[in-house]
Image (cartoon, rainbow, N blue to C red):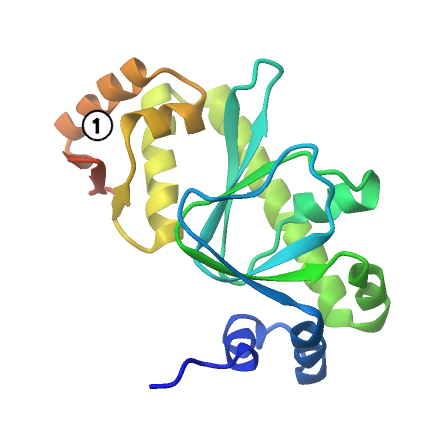
Amino acid sequence: MSRPSMKEILQKSYGYLFESDFLEEIESVGVYRKVKQGELLMDIGQPIGMMPLLLNGAIKILREDEEGDELLLYFLEKGDTCAMTVSCFMGQNKSEIRAVAEADTELLMVPVEKMEIWMARYKSWRQFIVDSYHTRMMELLETVDTLAFMRMDERLLKYLQDKAKVNHNDTVQTTHQEIALDMHTSRVVVSRLLKKLEKEGKIEMQRNQIVVLEL
């Protein structure tokens, strides 16, 4: 079986959002990129020349504090773009976030200078960017609420549920240390809380993976 063309892949991921002539323009300027799980796509302070359109897979977006510790902000999946990338470009042209592949991921990278042109030319693109801002803002508010109001075990369960949903798999491939880094806590705390969640029947721990039983 032959591999689908980029036009077919774009149609599948974004055809419900964008008109055919716009999809053709995206295809003409986009640069296809495939990244492996754990690969760094963008780092803090890096100049922004391209913005991602996700075709398959998932990306996690992280912030870093003054001590260099990371905090997970949200996930991106197929059909998404990163509103933080858009915001950074419109501001100072340098990234304020770190983007890491949550799973093996396929992207189409489009030049950021096309954004202003497309905003004026295509209503569908304007709406897509507005909707992306709104969705990411709601996710950021949810992250703030989680940090402020949820117990650590509730935060951990939500984190695992989010990872399972974005990967479309109730088995999460991860380690206690990786969870600790994402949640800005210690591996000892994570290990203790995972045992608590397993005892409560909400997860099942296996070697380097966790089955989320409560989704």
Q: Is residue 110 above or below residue 15?
A: above
Q: Is residue 196 above or below residue 52?
A: above
Residue at 28% from the left image edge and 43% from the top image edge: 172
Residues 187 and 131: in front is: 187
How many marks do you count on the picture? 1
Q: Position of residue 203 (x, y in %)?
A: 19, 36
Amino acid type, mark 1: Leu
Q: Position of residue 162 (x, y in %)?
A: 39, 43
Residues 175 and 147: in front is: 175
> Could you tell me which secondary element the residue under label 1 belongs to?
helix
Q: Position of residue 92 (x, y in %)?
A: 82, 38
The residue pinned by badge 1 equals 197
* Crowd band around label 1 with a 10 angstrom C-alpha radius: few (<14), some (14–19), many (20+): some
Residue at 68% from the left image edge and 34% from the top image edge: 96
Residue at 23% from the left image edge and 25% from the top image edge: 194
Quadrant in the picture for the N terminus: bottom left
Residue at 78% from the left image edge and 72% from the top image edge: 122
Quadrant in the picture for the C terminus: top left
- Quadrant position of residue 213: top left
Q: Is residue 37 above or below residue 94?
A: below
Q: Position of residue 30 (x, y in %)?
A: 66, 68
Is 90 situated left or right of 30 in this image?
Answer: right
